[in-house]
Image (cartoon, coloured by chain):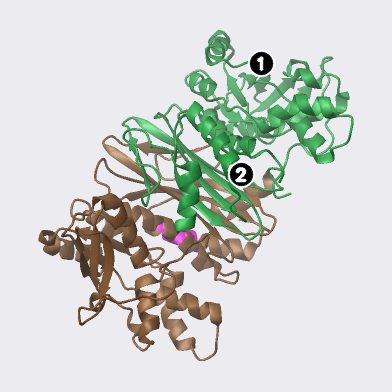
Chain colours: A brown, B green
């Protein structure tokens, strides 16, 4: 195991925080506090499916952790630590250096130390597995099944840019360089909304992070909570760089585009001033985009109050 | 995500224990108790590297969890829950059914519920990522760096059979069917020594689970603890089915064979009666195979007291 250990040590080892035991033993150790719950999320990213082979390894390291931290944010949890499992066809020093730099920079920003994991040689695929563990007061989690009919529906940040960047990178036609340059930050450097998620505990009812598209992910809240929703398209926070796009393409990107990693949440209309203040304190932009209704179903209304009909796939299925 | 969710739900979903939140939200939730530490281990298994493509999926499901539970055992931790991430080239119903059956049977035996994870489509490799979370009283973990010079060195279970089975499966020559049939259980159905690990808290000094070979893994204890050891080859617990093997092959398998998933631990000679009783209560066999010494280095003595010289690779390096 010396080669494997050398790799991990050289690029990933950092001193563990006081009271923690990091890599080097059979398990990592973390203290557990009374009256709390642990929140845990595990995701896999596969080259060619979840990221391009030639993506900047620094941004890939960032994003691999960001998508998991976003799940903690959507529960309102504070990160405790993370675990990284890499399956690589070869030990590419430049790639490891960049990846570990991006991963650690985000881990440090959110006080989420890398405490262990595994590194193995793959046959062909580069596969990145991250597990994050967070903590929150017992019973305070922002669950998907807690929306009530009559809630406001909110979204943090802006919509559409990550999806547009993904499509441009898939096509790579000339002439789109300026739009790609403006949009790709949203795709490659998603910022998990941890401060907002924690600030929403006790204020929001249900929450989810938007990874597969606003309509699909809000649909999970509605299905789990047994209600419906009516959204207003003109209330959607569209990224400025997209305002010149064809209207149909833009709608698709805003409503169905994935890789957003912003929080969609519901809350009582009485909580509006508190939510606006909580978001300001967290440094997050939030927009009220509609409301939940007792009747199941999800409708998006245009500026005239008529329903918008969408074409194509309303979200992304990794097994479709 | 509907296809992905269907797969996970059909084969892996089980009701979460009281006070837990299982799959279906952004994170799983687990209660955390005061005065405890969390022990966490994450491992990746890749087809063709860590398991044969045609291995029985039931035993593969068992082993994928067993190797991680073995890490909890080696810290003395009690399992809280586990997370499974599968990257698969296709959704093979028969394989998923078998794999999930083996995984869940072991999870239930050790009260380690599957609480979440991820399922994604790979390009070619089947990659299995498991993260286990355990709990133990704060400060009681059996760490690698706690051996003292003058300790006894112990091993649980028996040695050699998994390595012999692996070599026979790699060669698949005719005439070895009886030996393979007797030895392959050790390779394919390792039994994590969780009860023994927990019983050794407060009794053993240092512990490790033997995944890469006795000498290599004991070497990790010695390096972390700053001491050496002298082992007696004739004290090694050799699996009965191997007694007809060539002596040189047998030594290699016993001392350097991997995939053992038994506990190697050190303890004061005063603790001998307590350790024997703890092992009996846990239903585990333990053997005293040598002692630690102040002088760094690891020696194995034969029945005449002369040092044994090993040929070949003293363990397995996944990146070698």
Is residue B135 within the magenta segment?
Answer: no
| Label 1 SS | strand
Name the mark nearer the viewer: 1 or 2: 2
Is residue A107 within the magenta segment?
Answer: yes
- Identify the residue at the far bottom of this view: A175
Q: Assess disc 1: are there few (<14), some (14-19) or many (≥20) residues with their C-alpha within 10 Å of its C-alpha.
A: many
Coordinates of residue B255 in the picture (x, y in percent): 75, 28
Quarter-wise, where is residue B135 in the image?
top left
- Evaluate if marks 1 and 2 touch, with contact meaning CB atoms under 8 Å apart: no
Mark 1 sits on what residue? B288
Viewport quadrant of the N terminus of chain A:
top right
Q: Is residue B143 visible?
A: no
Work out whether mark 1 precedes mark 2 in sequence or the reverse, and give the earlier one: 2
Mark 2 sits on what residue? B94
Coordinates of residue A83 in the picture (x, y in percent): 49, 48
- The stretch of residues the image draws in magenta is A102-108
Q: Is residue B186 left or right of residue B307?
A: left
Q: Is residue A255 above or below residue B264?
A: below
Disc marking residue B47: none
User: Magenta region, mostly helix, strand or loop?
Assistant: helix
Quarter-wise, where is residue B74 in the image?
top right
B193 or B307, which lies in front? Answer: B193
Dot 1 and dot 2 within a common chain: yes
Identify the residue at image location x=72%, y=22%: B230
Coordinates of residue A316 in the picture (x, y in percent): 46, 65
Coordinates of residue B112 in the picture (x, y in percent): 46, 32
């Amino acid at each position: 195991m010396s080669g494997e250990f050398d790799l991990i040590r050289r690029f990933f080892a950092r001193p563990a925080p006081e009271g923690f035991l990091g890599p080097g033993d059979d398990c990592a150790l973390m203290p557990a506090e009374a009256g709390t719950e642990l929140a845990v999320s595990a995701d896999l990213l596969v080259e060619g499916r979840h990221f391009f082979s030639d993506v900047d390894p620094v941004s890939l390291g960032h994003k691999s952790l960001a998508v998991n931290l976003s799940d903690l944010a959507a529960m309102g949890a504070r990160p405790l630590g993370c675990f990284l499992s890499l399956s690589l066809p070869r030990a590419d020093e430049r790639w490891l250096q960049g990846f570990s730099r991006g991963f650690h920079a985000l881990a440090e920003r959110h006080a989420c130390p890398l405490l262990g994991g595994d590194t193995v040689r793959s046959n062909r695929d580069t596969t990145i597995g991250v597990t994050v563990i967070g903590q929150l007061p017992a019973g305070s989690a922002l669950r998907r099944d807690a929306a009530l009919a009559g809630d406001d529906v909110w979204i943090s940040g802006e919509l559409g840019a990550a999806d547009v960047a993904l499509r441009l990178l898939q096509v790579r036609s000339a002439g789109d360089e300026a739009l790609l340059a403006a949009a790709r930050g949203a795709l490659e450097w998603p910022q998990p909304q941890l401060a907002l998620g924690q600030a929403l505990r006790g204020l929001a009812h249900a929450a989810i992070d938007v990874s597969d598209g606003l309509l699909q992910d809000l649909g999970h809240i509605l299905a789990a909570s047994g209600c419906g929703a009516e959204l207003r398209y003109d209330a959607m926070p569209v990224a400025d760089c997209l305002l010149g796009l064809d209207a149909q393409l833009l709608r698709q990107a805003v409503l169905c585009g994935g890789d957003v990693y912003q929080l969609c949440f519901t809350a009582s209309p009485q909580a509006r001033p508190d939510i606006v203040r909580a978001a300001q304190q967290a440094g997050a932009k939030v927009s009220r985009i509609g409301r939940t209704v007792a009747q199941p179903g999800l409708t998006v209304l245009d500026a005239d109050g008529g329903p918008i009909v969408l074409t194509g796939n309303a979200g992304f299925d990794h097994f479709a």
